[in-house]
Image (tube, rainbow, N blue to C red):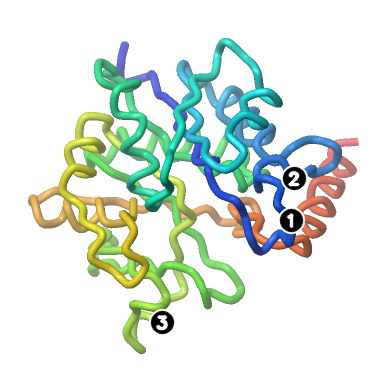
Amino acid sequence: MTENKFCALILAAGKGTRMKSDLAKVLHLLEGRPLLYYSLLAARSAGAEKIIVIIGHQAPLVREEFADPGIIFVEQSPQLGTGHAVLQAKEALAEYAGLTVILCGDVPLLKPATIEILIKNHRASGAPLTVLTTYPSDPRGYGRVVQDTGRNVLKIVEERDASPAEKKIGEINTGIYCVNTSFLFAALEKITNNNKQQEYYLTDIVEVAVREGFVVRSQVAPDYVEVMGINTPEELIRASQHLRNDRKSLV
């Protein structure tokens, strides 16, 4: 049945300038494996029937490293934001009837069970879009999740656009979503790049949904470290330590 099927769409186009290296961010090694390896493993382990990877910076190198007939690579060029990145997969998902789970190629500690719970709760809610959120120890720098009293998501506000009250919100967007595929691409056609970065933000599909009378739900990842993105060499070292600790706990 189609409701039990999902496509994993992994964003892996970024350069990762804060890594202080010209190497594509998703090719940086974590415990001997490129970062993207872990996102692919989580998607497959959670049961993805289709995997699309959006690539950009050093696209030929990423294709070569992950040469696999089970992966559909889609190139984003030029890179005009996360919403624009996802839109590149429109043709590959034109006839797809399952759900789309959007993952990040630089979030290596995400567990398959978290993806499974996200999908389960998304289906149960009947919402077209569910955002995976978390509560980090310090929310500064992250997009805040603005909700009503019923925990319906109203919008996601980037730090630079947030009001003083919004900056006090502790719940942040992880960049991971479960979304009805048909809604996803209809909503992406309606977003604009009318912002300081002049980019098409994927987060803007939340406001599209709300404007059209849909409910948007959130799912909280209790361990914020699990959904931590890797942006700096220091964060790579921290992720390595967490992976080692996880392995020790399994022995």
Q: Are marks 3 and 2 in contact (CB under 8 Å)?
A: no
Query: Which of labels 3 and 1 is toward the front?
Result: 1
Q: Residue at x 52, y 53 (%)?
A: 221
Q: Residue at x 40, y 78 (%)?
A: 160
Q: Which residue is mark 3?
A: 167
Q: Is residue 176 left or right of residue 96?
A: right
Question: In the picture, which quadrant includes the C terminus?
Answer: top right
Q: Residue at x 35, y 21 (%)?
A: 92
Q: Residues within 10 Å of mark 3 (few under 14, many from 20)?
A: many
In what element is the residue under mark 1? loop
Query: Which of labels 3 and 2 is toward the front?
Result: 2
Q: How far from the left and from the top, in percent, is residue 232?
A: 71, 62
In what element is the residue under mark 3? helix
Question: In the picture, which quadrant includes the N terminus?
Answer: top left
- Above or below, 84 relative to 33: below
Q: Which residue is mark 1?
A: 21
Q: How far from the left and from the top, in percent, is residue 86?
A: 37, 39
Question: What kind of residue is marked 2?
Answer: His
Q: Which residue is mark 2?
A: 28
Viewer-closest of 195 and 107 = 195
Q: How far from the left and from the top, in percent, is residue 77?
A: 43, 40
* Spatial CA span between label 1 and label 2: 9 Å
Instruction: Give the mark nearest the N terminus, 3 or 1.
Output: 1
Viewer-closest of 151 and 202 = 202
Q: Residue at x 79, y 59 (%)?
A: 238
